[in-house]
Image: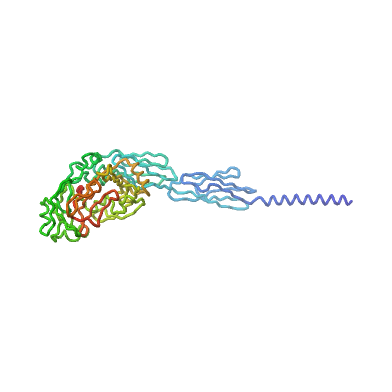
Amino acid sequence: MKTEIMKYFVLLFCFSLAACDSDDKTKNVPDLNIVSSGLTIKAAGGTGTIEVETPGSWHAESNKDWCTLTTSGNQITVSVPENLSLSSRTAQITITSPQKTKTIPVNQEGIIIILSQPELTLGYSGDPKNLLVESNIGWNAAVEAGWCHLEKTGDTLKISAEPYSANINRETQITLTAGDYTQTVKVTQRFKGAFVLDRWSDTNLGATLPATEENVNSANYRDTWGNFYQWGRNVGFPHGVTYKVITTNPSITAESAQTMSEFIGSSETMPMDWLIDGSRTTKPASGNSYTWKDRAGSDPSPAGWHIPLDYEASQIFPIDEFEGRYSRVDRLVNKEVLEADGTEYTCVSTGDGNRTRYAIKKYGTNEAYILRYEFIEPDGINSYLKITEIKGDAYTDFQDALEAEKLFEAAKESAVLLFPSCGYLYTNTGGPNSEGVSGSYWTASPVNEYTVYVSMGNWQTHIDANYCPRALGCSIRCVKDEE
């Protein structure tokens, strides 16, 4: 009897365990569990999935027509077409079971299109440049002018032009379209004479040969030197000649000095001016309060040309000794005046530490241009400065000489100008100094009781606006008159 009772209790315990296990399993099934994936959709469109876990029936719906649902088993596929708007958009997916309701957002990006630059400048040869287009949707490009050509490859738009020979820049516009969004890019093609160096003569005033690389490296290199001039005198003194020298005195006027053949020597005391008659151009000057013409009455340059003013010299030369010092390799940032109206521009410069420097003039603007200064000494007796110009834009930059040189390596067009090292004539004796070693070139601009001039040698090339006696004999390189 006891055995039978024991069997009964064992059987009852087993039934109890089975019932508990069944209750636990029921409790572990959620009323409504949602697992979603990929519900942030790109502007180009796409799909995402929703997994539904529930013990009973359920259904799902979207509150936006552009967001559609396809159900298979316990999985929902969410399909979203291309978004043609700049604005992002959101749909709500509502999933309902007898026990519970849940809402899941579906987000889609708006159109994103980013250009590497909003404007682009081509050279007169029309060689291509690339525009990078970063977009989350497909895009197309079209151009207004027939002379401009486009080639799309992936995210790159290659822009080129037909060669151009007119004497004024031409422009057109590219329209990029992505969905309902459009963006324009201005394209300018430069004319052939657009280089700043093209305004400068290639020949020193009075020289019988232009300063080309062939000529400055020939046996006749001295024929590229031209004449020396005292500031404000239109009398040229050829190199290699011994001049009669007279010492300045108050009886010599600016007018009479224009017909005198003698070199007018100054005293040894500052400011070492050949003119000491007390007239207006002997007084301290501020800026261009008077110029060479005000003293001489005219300019020795040929018709259509003139002696450069200080701001014109600043357009192609380093503005101070730090910017023009060849030993410097750091990146310098300066402000400089490059226009007659006094407009200031930023200049960025660097160097290789070995007689080559680089500068970006009008840095950060679409008129930016890059200059490379190389002081070359073929044999130590006929050195010269070589300036090479290439064009840039508002995005042109470099951090060091290696990056700067790569810009020149990639350039398809350039302009070159050479300045021979003619030396100078000393103030009181008229004797030659530093021939073949350094160069001194006048501007027409005074500063205080002295003159702004360009100094170039193997240590630095720069515009000196602090001290240059007017009795020196220096070279002249002319600039074209504005049309």
Residue 18, position in %: x, y? 75, 49
Tell me the residue at 48%/46% (across/down).
Answer: 42
Tell me the residue at 25%/48% (across/down).
Answer: 438
- 325 or 288, which is in the foreground? 325
Q: How many labels, in total? A: 0
Tell me the residue at 48%/44% (across/down).
Answer: 45
Residue 129 falls in image quadrant: top left
- 306 or 228, which is in the foreground? 228
In the image, 331: left or right of 306?
right
Residue 307, position in %: x, y? 19, 50
- 180 or 353, which is in the foreground? 353
Colouring rule applied to residues: rainbow
Residue 161 falls in image quadrant: top left
Residue 302 seen in this snapshot: no
Residue 53 seen in this snapshot: yes
Residue 179, position in %: x, y? 42, 45
In the image, 424: left or right of 414?
left
- 286 or 466, which is in the foreground? 466
In the image, 422: left or right of 157?
left
Tell me the residue at 40%/39% (across/down).
Answer: 153
Residue 43, position in %: x, y? 46, 46
